[in-house]
Amino acid sequence: MALLQISFFSKSLKRETTINALLPLDGPRPDDAPPIKAVYLLHGYTSSYTEWLTHSRIRELSNRYQIAVFMPSGENHFYLDDVEREALYGEFVGKELVEFTRRMFPISHRREDTLIGGLSMGGYGALRNGLYYGDTFGGIIALSSALLPYHVGDIKPGTHNGIAGYSYYRAVFGDLDNVLGSDKDPEELIRQLKAKDAPVPDIYMACGTEDFLLEVNRRLGQFLKDEAVHHTYRESPGNHSWDFWNEKIADALEWFKQAADSKPNEPQG
Amino acid sequence: MALLQISFFSKSLKRETTINALLPLDGPRPDDAPPIKAVYLLHGYTSSYTEWLTHSRIRELSNRYQIAVFMPSGENHFYLDDVEREALYGEFVGKELVEFTRRMFPISHRREDTLIGGLSMGGYGALRNGLYYGDTFGGIIALSSALLPYHVGDIKPGTHNGIAGYSYYRAVFGDLDNVLGSDKDPEELIRQLKAKDAPVPDIYMACGTEDFLLEVNRRLGQFLKDEAVHHTYRESPGNHSWDFWNEKIADALEWFKQAADSKPNEPQG
Amino acid sequence: MALLQISFFSKSLKRETTINALLPLDGPRPDDAPPIKAVYLLHGYTSSYTEWLTHSRIRELSNRYQIAVFMPSGENHFYLDDVEREALYGEFVGKELVEFTRRMFPISHRREDTLIGGLSMGGYGALRNGLYYGDTFGGIIALSSALLPYHVGDIKPGTHNGIAGYSYYRAVFGDLDNVLGSDKDPEELIRQLKAKDAPVPDIYMACGTEDFLLEVNRRLGQFLKDEAVHHTYRESPGNHSWDFWNEKIADALEWFKQAADSKPNEPQG
Amino acid sequence: MALLQISFFSKSLKRETTINALLPLDGPRPDDAPPIKAVYLLHGYTSSYTEWLTHSRIRELSNRYQIAVFMPSGENHFYLDDVEREALYGEFVGKELVEFTRRMFPISHRREDTLIGGLSMGGYGALRNGLYYGDTFGGIIALSSALLPYHVGDIKPGTHNGIAGYSYYRAVFGDLDNVLGSDKDPEELIRQLKAKDAPVPDIYMACGTEDFLLEVNRRLGQFLKDEAVHHTYRESPGNHSWDFWNEKIADALEWFKQAADSKPNEPQG
């Protein structure tokens, strides 16, 4: 299992950025081996590209599921484009990083072999960008997602909610009164995909029953059910912590594997 | 010469960030060895914490001058506080990073053993933060500095100067009509230090005669001369490139060494 | 929790080597905070300095127990001195690395704050070097230890035991008929410490009941009991895998913490 | 210019090892771009995989010549197979590393696009393995090469030549009286290639006139001339230092580029 740290110039961010990666490529592969799947894993608020690698056991999972793992940095920007500062985090993780890693490594280019996932802020980032770039990603893993669009409308100028202040949310999400219904709102993105008959990625959601984000996760879970999106929603005892995320990232990769195994063979492009 | 990559939580940035470092500590040091000096080196626009280490021969210089080198990331923010986004790059490189590295490593805490330097955007960052935190830094190395305060007043809404657009400069520098005269203007910072009789760091400036930033560097050089700041200003053939910076970073460290050697011994605190 | 990768010149190995490290130093520490403890963690056969960081959740444990963690590379040499090739792995992990990290970082210099641990080959390395440098280490964590001294006498010229051949074991352990009773034999090292009335480090041993190394671990566990060494020996269902080691490394750090907490306060040097 | 650190399992070394790499792949490449060339760069005695990246300006050269650079660790073994310890350094850099990087990255598989180079111990390693695996490498860059086969016959049991002792050389090179004429002797390897009418890689050699290794480099240079091997041999003022190697690695890549440009187009396989 090759472990990589990669620093490279991102056009979307207009600067060099660093990611960690795992590639199941240090043994020979038979010529008829299936193409290597890929998952793009997003970290949480206050953390960076080192988080998944050093807090989870993702290296073993990468080996078990023969899936490449790419772990970028989102720098507290919720994986959204900051047009003002010319740092397009959404475009970076949803488009450029996929193109770059496909150019660099022999991974599958197929939608159904390409997942995006994350925890907390990264769970939101995975939902938002997995849906916004729904033609690229066949699946989304959203753990304890910080689904702020449900809340940011309540944040008023001059206030601070203990995590950050109004101006921060304003800068990251734009007009806070209009995040719901915008392309930063997972529900709206699903409605848009369905309206144009585009495929919606399969979604694995999970949240601990002691997590302070439980309510918003339940709310989106219900929406997925109402809209008949192919998904699973898991709840179990746990809070906003790595005990929960370690359990669920393994469960999520297993869920996607079984889904893939149960599909009829498709011709590969 | 120990080479380090360090990822740690920055309170100023509210998240984990990564730096490279060099520490001349892998041989035993005599008990009466002088304390290890330190220089904080800032990269240019579009680059990151890897730039100095992989484009210059700073590892040899760190050994030659027995100086620790710390190389953070500035992420296109010109090493200025982004209050809106709660990412205080100025406070990070000028204050927190110094405190963190002094807590982590056995380096000198003395102002005269502490330098800040950089190239292009980082040259500006070194001047601004070296002066703003003038009680911390005894010297500044400013190579081909992107002294944007002289220019940003000319950037108008809706325009793009080939490097970035108005909204970017506005977000990074604040009110563009009032950068000159603010605490983002090196001239103003020097005036303020002199007004309160605080020591001004020694300054090494250099710019290539083919550099597109020559004019603004000359302008600040002239100001330093007019204000009788202890400094040197070097010009030689060269453009905005690593041939020039490799030459000048070595020259700068030599200049500071000779200045230190020529000073009478001071009692050490 | 600061995460570091450090490359530095080792005199014992006569070359640059790389380690990973964790230091609980990215928050301010009160002046009366206790000194930071340290554990040196050794990887298993076929692996390297990245193993502990990317397969376990040691980063969380480092934070929970406020203990610095240093993870070197042993390069299939069982952490023994290879005098012939002038690569002294035992001296490196048992002496030089401790001295280097104490020179570089503000960690405790006290024996009772200094642990050495490892898994499989690294479990053996921790036992051997923890005992050989028993004046440096107050405790040893030995997980699923590859206690080859019990076996290498059976390996005959020209044979290969599925893992490596005779010449390899001969090169690493020396005269295979005389490893037992030498300073590569944990039992002998304990006898020597007791003979000179030197303190024996506290020992935490663990092995899974499905592990192919169970028998040799039981044998040493019995010896520790017979010799009344202060230790614990844990067995539970599990094989030679990270599920077991993740569980036991947490358990081991907790065991050492409780042992430390239950000791009367000592004057600190 | 993407910068990578890669840790992966090497079958030749029977363990995980770490390399640095540079890949000119962070911009889009036109479909008809020529395949990316590759150079494998070997460090000197006492150093490691970080040496080339942090002492030279190879990152700029990688960009200028659009050549991928792979920098492994040789751990004082002169890039020779240590059969006894089951660590086959020659096979690793000459065969496995090439195959691994070709499997991992979209680099050219053509012999004429594949170089091996090094300095001092690495210069010897490049000559030995470039010739031993002469079907893989089209060119060799040998800077200030430590051509020990000319000397090791003089090292006697019980002696130490200031760098290492007899037993070390014996362990690394085997029977010291018979290194000349063996497959560790570049002259012999060239004779063997010619005997079987196999192509000999083009060779760039350089040595400083103040280098303590000047004589052995001249000796091999003369041999190349006598044998009409396609090569260049450069001498200029300089000693065993990075000033010299920085100058010559740039010169070497230019020499190979001009050689490639002057060849008639070949059909590409």
Image (cartoon, coloured by chain):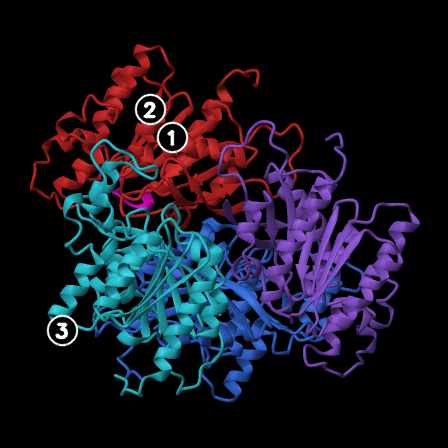
Chain colours: A purple, B blue, C cyan, D red
Label 3 Cα neighbours within 10 Å, binned few <14 / some 14-19 / many ≥20? few
Q: Are marks 1 and 3 in contact (CB under 8 Å)?
A: no
Label 1 Cα neighbours within 10 Å, binned few <14 / some 14-19 / many ≥20? many
Q: Examine the structure image and report whether residue A253 is included in the region drawn in magenta.
A: no
Q: Is residue D164 visible?
A: no
Give the letter of the chain under mark 2: D
Mark 1, residue position: D94
Label 2 Cα neighbours within 10 Å, binned few <14 / some 14-19 / many ≥20? many
Stretch in magenta: D237-244
Between the C-alphas of marks 2 and 3, the distance is: 57 Å
Mark 2, residue position: D132
Question: Going from the N terminus, do you reach mark 2 or mark 1 first?
Answer: 1
Q: Position of residue B2 (x, y in %)?
A: 35, 59
Residue drawn at 71 percent across, 78 percent down = A165
Q: Is residue C75 visible?
A: yes
Please name which of the two marks, 2 or 3, marks the residue nearer to the observer.
3
**Closer to the camera in the image, B79 or C16:** C16
Q: SS at mark 1?
A: helix
Q: Are marks 2 and 1 in contact (CB under 8 Å)?
A: yes
Mark 3, residue position: C197
**Closer to the camera in the image, A131 or B215:** A131
